[in-house]
Every structure is written in structure tokens, then in C-alpha cells.
Image: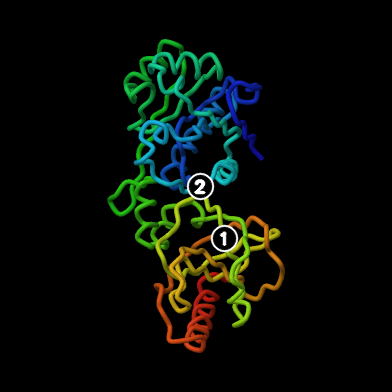
């Protein structure tokens, strides 16, 4: 298991004298995997740890808060995937104005050299760093050469002729194309939230739901999805309803998760939910009977996809 370090002012002994990759790594997708494999090889060559340095909040959130896209992964989830790929340390740098004002040369010296005593760096071909993103790969190469730091540039990865990126995955999720998004991710797209009290209407018609609130990542568009819930070390098939319930005259946006064949009290628990595939859109039914029949069909289809 890797080590998650929040902040760069504390003990960085486990993260020093190794190879480092800098970036958001949001979603941790197939494109990231190629870079991370190169990072591990370089770390082995320099006989140090494989370190990922990321920023929280993302610099864009401070520079252009109105245009910052929602995240694909919360930080603990990001760490979990990175560690499963063999990364030794994930260090989360708390972004502030002083960091954003560092010129590229100062960032390299103060962060990579002074704090991490870096011996190797791995980045993608479009990497930018420092104030106003003035630093590029050419400058990084020059700075590494001055300090005798090894530099490896990983090639961008493509799928069906398009680059694999967090932006592309985000667009697919916004379109409701979870199947395509999941093909680019290393693990199925996952949301999380706290189970809150709802109307309990689902329980009365035989389809109890867990109502999720405080979801920190991008939600797919309104619809019904097949998925799985991570619960007590198990993956349980689940039908996920995102959006209002027009059959009962509701307009509020909700996320309701029906755990198939599960009985138990989940109130107050934090649930992690894999979203696999959209199975239908939101529809207003004539009444409870028609709604119930459709829910049976939703559950049957979810079983086929999720189990």
C-alpha cells in the first residue's frame, strides 16, 4: 500500500530522492497508466520512490473558478487507484497564491529540488508549469540537465484516433455514455455520497432506495443506470436513478440507489457506487402500477449488466 501525504511542509522523507510525476491525474485513466509505468521504471533506475505530486484544489479552481470542471475522482479514490498501479507516494500540495506566483525556475528549485531532492521526472509532452503556465517541456529539460536530474517524456495515448484525456472522459460522462467512458478508465466510473433520509416512497412499493447527498464528483445526466455498490468488501448490483421523479410531481434533482437483494439500514453511511451503463431516461408514468412494472424491468436489466 502506498503513502498519501497531504501537504509538503511535513515529513517528506518517504518521497525524497526518487522519480516524480506532476499533474492532476483526475480519473486515473489509460493515458495516465502509460506515464505511471514509465515513472516506476525511472524510480527503479534512480533507486528511489515513485512519487506523484498533485494539487488540491486544482490550480484552475483558484485562477478561473467559474470555468473549473467538476472532478472525476475524489482524492482518496485517486490515491487508491494510483497505489494499485504501484505508485509509492501520492503527495497532495495545498494550492495557494504563493504557489501560483512561482516562476517555472523557482518552482523547479523550491519544490522539486529543495523539498523532494528529485532524481528523475516523468511528464507528458504537453506539460506546463510555473506562473501563467510559462514552463514547458523544453524548459523542464534544460532545468533537469542543469541539476543532473533524469527526464523522461511519455507519449500521449490515443483510442480510436482521439487522445485519451480527463476532458474527453468528462465529456462522455456528461453525454451519458458511461460505457465509452469506462473503456478509457482503468476502473468503472465511481461516485460517492452520504445516505440521507428521503421520502421512503420506494420502500412502500418494494424498491427501497438509498438517497445520496454531498456527491463530490461529476454526475452523469438524468437517467437510470446499471451499477454496483461497494459495501463491506462486496460489490452489490444496484439500479441508480439520477434526476427528479416526475411520476410523483417532483422536480428536485436526486440520486437514488436501489441495492438489489439487499436489506439493511444504510442511513448516514458513505456509499461508493460504480456507474456502468445507462439503461433508460427519466419518464413520467401514469401511476404506481406502471412505475412498479418498469422498475422490475430496470432491475432485471441491471442484473444482466452488473453481475
Residue extending furthest front? 249
Residue at position x 59%, y 45% in the image: 80
Neighbour class for label 2 at 10 Å: few (<14), some, many (≥20)?
many
**Residue 286 figure quarter:** bottom left
Q: Tally the marks.
A: 2
Residue at position x 50%, y 62% in the image: 275
Q: Secondary structure at mark 1?
A: strand
Residue extending furthest left? 161
Neighbour class for label 1 at 10 Å: few (<14), some, many (≥20)?
many
Quadrant housing the C terminus: bottom right
Tell me where residue 194 appears, x and y as whole percent. 61, 56
Mark number displayed over residue 73: 2
Q: Is residue 63 left or right of residue 72?
A: left
Indicate which label's residue lies in the foreground, 2 or 1: 1
Query: Distance of mark 2 from mark 1, alpha carbons?
Result: 16 Å
Q: How is the image coloured?
A: rainbow
**Residue 193 figure quarter:** bottom right
Position above or below: 194 against 280: above
Tell me where residue 133 appears, x and y as whole percent. 34, 25
Tell me where residue 178 appears, x and y as whole percent. 42, 61
Mark number displayed over residue 223: none
Q: Is residue 7 left or right of residue 143?
A: right
Q: Nearer the viewer, residue 170 or 234?
A: 170
Residue extending furthest bottom? 289
Q: Earlier in the sequence, mark 2 or mark 1?
A: 2
Q: Secondary structure at mark 2?
A: loop
Tell me where residue 31 appears, x and y as whole percent. 41, 44
**Residue at the disc numbered 1:** 212
Amino acid at each position: 500500500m502506498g503513502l498519501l501525504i497531504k501537504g509538503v511542509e511535513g515529513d517528506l522523507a518517504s518521497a525524497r530522492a526518487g522519480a516524480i510525476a506532476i499533474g492532476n491525474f483526475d480519473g486515473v485513466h489509460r493515458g495516465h497508466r502509460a506515464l505511471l509505468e514509465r515513472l516506476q521504471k525511472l524510480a527503479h533506475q534512480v533507486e528511489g520512490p515513485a512519487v506523484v505530486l498533485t494539487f488540491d484544489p486544482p490550480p484552475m479552481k483558484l485562477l478561473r473558478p467559474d470555468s473549473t470542471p467538476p472532478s472525476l475522482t475524489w482524492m482518496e479514490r485517486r490515491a487508491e487507484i494510483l497505489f494499485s498501479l504501484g505508485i509509492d507516494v501520492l503527495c497532495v500540495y495545498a494550492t495557494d497564491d504563493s504557489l501560483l506566483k512561482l516562476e517555472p525556475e523557482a518552482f523547479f528549485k523550491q519544490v522539486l529540488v529543495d523539498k523532494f531532492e528529485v532524481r528523475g521526472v516523468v511528464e507528458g509532452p504537453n506539460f506546463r508549469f510555473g506562473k501563467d503556465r510559462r514552463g514547458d517541456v523544453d524548459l523542464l529539460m534544460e532545468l533537469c540537465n542543469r541539476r543532473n536530474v533524469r527526464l523522461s517524456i511519455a507519449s500521449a495515448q490515443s483510442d480510436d484516433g482521439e487522445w485519451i484525456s480527463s476532458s474527453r472522459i468528462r465529456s462522455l460522462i456528461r453525454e451519458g455514455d458511461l460505457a465509452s467512458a469506462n473503456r478509457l478508465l482503468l476502473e468503472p466510473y465511481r461516485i460517492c455520497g452520504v445516505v440521507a433520509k428521503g421520502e421512503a416512497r420506494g420502500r412502500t412499493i418494494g424498491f427501497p432506495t438509498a438517497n445520496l447527498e454531498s456527491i463530490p464528483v461529476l454526475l452523469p445526466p438524468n437517467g437510470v443506470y446499471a451499477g454496483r455498490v461497494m459495501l463491506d468488501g462486496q460489490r452489490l448490483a444496484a439500479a441508480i436513478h439520477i434526476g427528479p421523479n416526475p411520476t410523483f410531481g417532483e422536480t428536485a434533482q436526486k440520486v437514488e440507489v436501489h441495492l438489489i437483494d439487499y436489506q439493511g439500514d444504510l442511513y448516514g453511511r458513505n456509499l461508493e457506487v460504480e456507474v456502468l451503463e445507462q439503461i433508460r431516461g427519466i419518464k413520467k408514468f401514469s401511476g404506481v402500477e406502471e412505475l412498479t412494472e418498469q422498475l422490475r424491468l430496470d432491475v432485471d436489466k441491471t442484473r444482466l449488466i452488473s453481475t
